[in-house]
């Protein structure tokens, strides 16, 4: 174990939650009913928010696979755009590049596929980001993998056009309020969508 983690009770607690939620995520992912319900809830939330461009993610084991939904969303309106993240260097902000179904891909850092086309014309600043969650709470705080990529990405995003952030998670991975103690750099997601519905938080929280 990294000595700095051993000395940080919050980091150690998050590590414990990641391990605890691994089986719950895999079980939910294999549930066809849960997948269909999450797809329907995602469709309803995005129809309400009406972004013109969406940044999403290439799924890792246990994560909801948004690729088919994104392909259908793109096909419904030719003016819509989708983008996937690229890691230029480890522990740096993500860069998003446009993606279409069947687009050439290449293996990036952490063995995650990324768009092969990465010229300036392919660079994207999506209106909305779909963000994978290992866990989440009702306030919209997210438990990720610990790499800090989305924190760095949002901190570096142009202030004039910050994206809406929608976490994608399984209801079994909801964490009790107060457990995910926010750190100074943490920002709540604007919503979290699961198979149970859309949980509005952050800038979308009802006033």
Image (tube, rainbow, N blue to C red):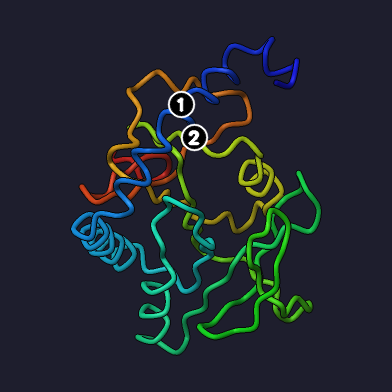
- Please name the residue that numbered disc 2 is placed on: 143
Residue sitting at 54 percent across and 63 percent down? 58
Mark 1, other Cα within 10 Å: few <14 / some 14–19 / many ≥20: some
Assess whether mark 2 and mark 1 are in contact (beta carbons under 8 angstroms): yes
Quarter where residue 175 is shown: top left
Sequence-wise, which precedes: disc 1 or disc 2?
A: 1
Quick one: 8 or 18, which is closer to the camera?
A: 18
Would you call the spot at circle 2 few (<14 residues within 10 Å), some (14-19), or many (20 or more)? many
In which quadrant of the rendered image does the N terminus lie?
top right
Q: From the viewer's side, name the closer residue of 12 and 47.
A: 12
Q: Residue at x 69, y 10 (%)?
A: 7
- Residue 207 in picture, x, y percent from top left: 29, 37
Q: 36 left or right of 16? A: left
Viewer-nearest of discs 1 and 2: 1
Image location of residue 170, percent across then percent down = 32, 45
Could you tell me residue 120's position as x and y percent? 78, 77
Depicted 115 relative to depicted 92: above or below: below
Whether residue 90 is situated above or below residue 207 in the rendered picture? below
SS at circle 2:
strand
Residue at 47% across / 50% down in the picture? 132
The secondary element bearing badge 1 is classed as helix
Q: Residue furthest right?
A: 89
Residue 54 horizontal/vertical position (percent): 49, 67
**Residue placed under numbered mark 1 in the picture:** 17
Image disc number at residue 103: none
Residue 53 located left or right of residue 85: left
Rendered view: 152 above or below 63? above
- Residue placed at 36% from the left, 40% from the top? 201
| Residue 55 in the image: above or below residue 137 | below
Foreground residue among 113 and 71? 113
């Amino acid at each position: 174990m990294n000595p700095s983690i051993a000395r940080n009770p919050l980091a150690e607690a998050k590590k414990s939650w990641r391990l605890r939620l691994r089986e719950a995520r895999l079980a939910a992912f294999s549930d066809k009913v849960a997948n269909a319900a999450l797809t329907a809830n995602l469709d309803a939330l995005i129809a309400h928010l009406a972004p013109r461009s969406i940044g999403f993610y290439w799924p890792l084991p246990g994560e909801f696979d948004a690729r088919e939904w994104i392909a259908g969303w793109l096909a419904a309106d030719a003016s819509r755009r989708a983008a996937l993240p690229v890691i230029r260097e480890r522990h740096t902000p993500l860069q998003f590049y446009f993606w279409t179904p069947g687009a050439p891909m290449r293996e990036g850092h952490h063995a995650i596929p990324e768009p092969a086309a990465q010229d300036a014309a392919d660079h994207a600043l999506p209106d909305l980001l779909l963000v994978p969650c290992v866990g989440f709470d009702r306030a919209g705080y997210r438990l990720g993998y610990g790499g800090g990529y989305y924190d760095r990405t949002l901190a570096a995003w142009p202030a004039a056009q910050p994206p809406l952030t929608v976490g994608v998670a399984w209801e079994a991975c909801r964490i009790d309020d107060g457990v995910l103690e926010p750190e100074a750099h943490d920002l709540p997601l604007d919503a979290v969508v699961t198979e149970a519905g859309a949980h509005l938080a952050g800038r979308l929280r009802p006033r």
